[in-house]
Amino acid sequence: MPNRLVVLVAHPDDEQRYENRWSPTMEQLVFITTNPKIFTQCQRALDGGNEWVYVQRMEYGPHKSRVIGRAKVARLDEAKLRVWFENWEDYDAAPSPAFGGSTFANFPE
């Protein structure tokens, strides 16, 4: 299995450590605000041109942690450490067993 960039985000109904924007249905991530490490990894995904970023939503209440989609990096705002996404594709998979946070993980495409 190849290594993929997977970002871990809080469920939209849970307390938010970072400002993230979800679509009106709360099923697609529009942007994340993140730390410098993840921002740099997303910048590399954009510079690479065709790299998917997988989005894992954390467990919250009755909702299990799941990889809910994948998207391409659309643009970056370095001043706010914000990453905007486009070309969202729904995806439903259990998290990689090796995955413990926003980082690269072995994950099927």
Image: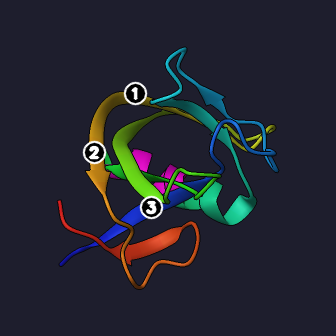
Task: Give percent across and percent down for residue 2.
Answer: 22, 75
Give the labeled residue for mark 2: 91
Residue at the spot of label 1: 86
Residue 47 located within the stretch drawn in magenta: yes
Q: Please identify the dominant SS of the magenta region.
A: helix
Q: Is residue 36 magenta?
A: no
* Left/right of residue 23 with respect to residue 35 in the rendered view: left
Name which residue type carries label 1: Glu
Image vertical order of residue 43 relative to residue 100, above or below:
above
Q: Earlier in the sequence, mark 2 or mark 3?
A: 3
Residue 104: give x, y in percent of width and height.
43, 73
The answer to whether residue 99 shows anywhere in this view is yes
Is disc 2 surrounded by few (<14), some (14 to 19) or many (20+) residues within 10 Å? some
Q: Which residue is mark 3?
A: 6
Res 1 → quadrant:
bottom left
Disc 2 is placed on an element classified as: strand
Q: Mark 1: which secondary structure?
A: strand
Amino acid at the residue labelled 3 = Val
Give the left or right position of residue 50, taking residue 80 as reference. Answer: left
